[in-house]
Image: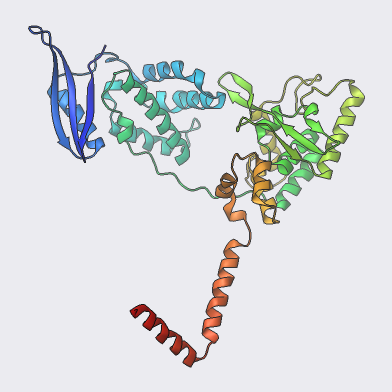
Amino acid sequence: MGVTGSIRQRGVNSWELRVYRGTDPTTGHRRWATRTVRGSRTEAQRELVDLARVANVAPVVGARTTMTELLDRWYGVSYVSWAPTTARSVRSIIDQQLVPGIGEVLVRELTAVTIDELYSRLRVSGRTDGKALSVGSVRRVHAVLHRALAQAMRWEWIWTNPAALASPPRSEPVEMRPPTPHDVAVLLAHTAEADPLLHLFVVLAATTGARRGQLLAALRWTDIDLETASISFQRALVEGPSGPVLVPTKTRRSHRVALDPGTSALLAAWLAGIAHAQAEVRDRFIFCYDEDGTRPRKPNYVTKRFIRSRKAAGLGHFRLHDLRHFMATQMLDVGVAVPIVAARLAHARASTTLNVYAHAVPGGDRHAAQQLSRLLAEVMSASPAKLKANSAQSDVGAAR
């Protein structure tokens, strides 16, 4: 077992530090180096490192472990409890940013300076193609590194977490720019001719607001009810570390969405065409690779097809996921109630919908401006004598 240390708060901004120095060979008693310091907890953590250095002690377990070894060992014991998408994302960050950047550094020798230098390099050329990594991506790298080093602390390999002292870039608000109705119409016209199955996918994405994984994995023909013009989402297809994996929906709840007449007619036409060629189609995936419909298309494959079609249609940049935003903003813009839009998006709470799409709820800000303008106009239209009298009454009221 490695040498241990602790921080105990004694009062406001007062901390007691203890570092275990081993057992006295004569008395057999445990020996401790102690110190009381004032300041923040972060400052106390720095003092703990100094105390361990002055006391001439250091963690023993994992003393020669590199960051690559720590990251691999932490991932190996942790990923089984993560969602497939989380495991895939963390593995990618370890392999593409952390191991190339600080993999050879010993865990004990990693400092906040080294981590900040890594973040700076990533912001310049952190992508696999040598281009700059976005602020959001660097912050995700920071989150992974912080968690791995926190585990190293629990394993008693290090005293403090240097990532807690590092300075990841501040998050930047991203302006939501969903495609316009014209953009969606142009894309649909193009895919109807060039890629009919992708055309069906885009129609469903734009009219139901479903996520990519839900459309790929939730949609078997048995999930479509043409009599009630509705669609049931019960599962999703996501990219795991070893490939696509079927998982529950993001909220772990199934939900049903109504279909408009045009989308219902398009689905009915597709079903009729498939049924003509094959007797039993109810259990088929709608978006599939094979003739028997047992293998849904991979999420990344569909995204690449979408990007090619968007460019071929001459449209500017917008993501496949932005079709979900398109559906939500258009519904809110025409006055559909927030709870209904939230249910369609499968948000657990309507407040989530408001947080994301508050800018799309019409009338609120304009109504406030109109009310303020009307109030000022009424005051300004009053006679000077009345304004003076009202002012005098206000002064008397304030004096009381």
Q: Position of residue 360 (x, y in %)?
A: 62, 54
* The C terminus - image quarter: bottom left
Q: Residue at x 47, y 39 (%)?
A: 136
Instruction: Answer above or below: position of 375 versus 255.
Output: below
Q: Residue furthest bottom?
A: 385
* The N terminus - image quarter: top left
Left or right of 9 on screen, residue 267: right
Q: Residue at x 42, y 17 (%)?
A: 72
Q: Is residue 105 visible?
A: no
Q: Position of residue 397 (x, y in %)?
A: 39, 80
Instruction: Answer above or below: position of 244 versus 214.
Output: above
- The residue lying toward the viewer, choosing from 91 and 18, is 18
Image quarter for residue 278?
Answer: top right
Left or right of 194 on screen, residue 33: left
- The residue lying toward the viewer, choosing from 316 and 233, is 233
Q: Residue at x 76, y 48 (%)?
A: 185
- The residue lying toward the viewer, choosing from 180 and 16, is 16
